[in-house]
Image (cartoon, rainbow, N blue to C red):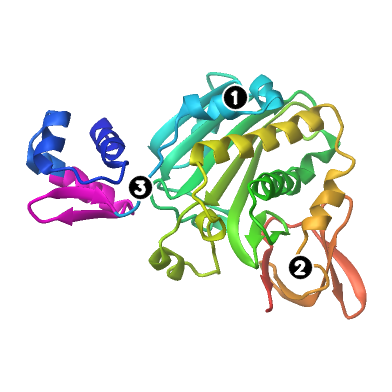
Amino acid sequence: MNKGHANLLSIISDGKLHSGEELASQQEISRAAIWKSIKHLQSLGVQIDAVHSKGYRLANQIELLSEKKIKQSLQPIAKGSCSSIELLFKTNSTNTFLFDQLARKDIHGNVVLAEYQSGGRGRRGNKWISPLASGLIFSVGWHFEVAPAALSLLSLYTGVAIARALKSAKINNLGLKWPNDVVVMNEKIAGILLEVRGEASGPVDVVIGVGINYDLDNNIKAGIEQPVTDICSHTSERLSRNELAALLLSNIFEILESLDLNINSNLLDEWRSFDCYFDRQAKLILPNEEIEGVLKGVDNQGALLISVDGEVKSYTSGEISLRVYP
């Protein structure tokens, strides 16, 4: 996306009416170019109203992300752990963007956030749908000189970090769904995609990708196959996206630092306290079979436990999809 689209969105992000003539003058381009830019932003999911003979305005005011505001709001541990914050207006994938940097530099403590992600993905190649500026999409890079014993639990621990942050932001009825979903009243509000490069017994680089629904249009929600919700549906006032981003990053960095220091003894129990599907009937969909049983939480290695015909079995495959019955 060219810089002009980002600048235009920044101008109209106040939610006020702006004439095409005014926008063209500020951007030093033609009104026809403004119209094309407006159409492009609309194609990315931005709700822009065109008022005849008056101009353009956003249907809802948007708070764009700010590196300065996020850094200012980070908690002390995160300020010491965060090496850099990079904001992208549009990218294919924040995870891929970070991993592509590994060939030329260290990504330890690096954070990349995007207003729009064209190739967002979840587990099993599922697409993460998030119109421009409607969510919080970011990735955190971390390097372990020696892979910690709890590395296999990092996806669950990241879920704990997100749940902590949202709980402190006064989001109620939070729950965690194995292995990488955060839900509110059984509706998905956030997902995690963890990717690792390195050797199990040696140095490893980890990229933690997080996608959180901030404010999704009802039409977008209706087009998603699973029940989803967003931050704005569960708060009386619109939370600052920048403050929320800082809160989430602060909690994630705190857990990453605890892993480095091997201080993580209570995190798995904390995950279990958020497990909202314990003792529920469920179907586990594996690549070549489907298993029905009763969910029994996770074991100490983070594997899913499910009781099948009275026998508790564990499952760790990354290709598992979980469908929980109402």
* CA distance for labels 1 and 2: 35 Å
Identity, as a three-letter code, of the amino acid under mark 3: Gln
Q: Quadrant of residue 50?
A: bottom left
Q: How many marks?
A: 3
- How packed mark 2 is, by other alpha carbons closer than 10 Å (few <14, some 14-19, many 20 or more), is many
Residue at the front extreme? 236
Relative side of 239 to 256, left or right: left
Report if the CB atoms under discs 3 and 1 are less than 8 Å apart.
no
Judge whether residue 307 can be spotted in this image.
yes
Relative side of 314 to 188, left or right: right
Give the structural element (helix, strand or loop) at label 2.
loop
Q: Nearer the viewer, residue 183 or 302?
A: 183
Judge whether residue 301 can be spotted in this image.
no
Which is more foreground, mark 2 or mark 3?
Answer: 3
Q: Is residue 101 magenta?
A: no
- How packed mark 3 is, by other alpha carbons closer than 10 Å (few <14, some 14-19, many 20 or more), is few
> What span is in magenta?
35-58
* CA distance for labels 2 and 3: 36 Å
Residue located at (78% from left, 44% from top): 152
| Residue marked by disc 1 | 107
Identity, as a three-letter code, of the amino acid under mark 2: Tyr
The disc placed on residue 277 is 2
Q: Is residue 40 magenta?
A: yes
Identity, as a three-letter code, of the amino acid under mark 1: Ile
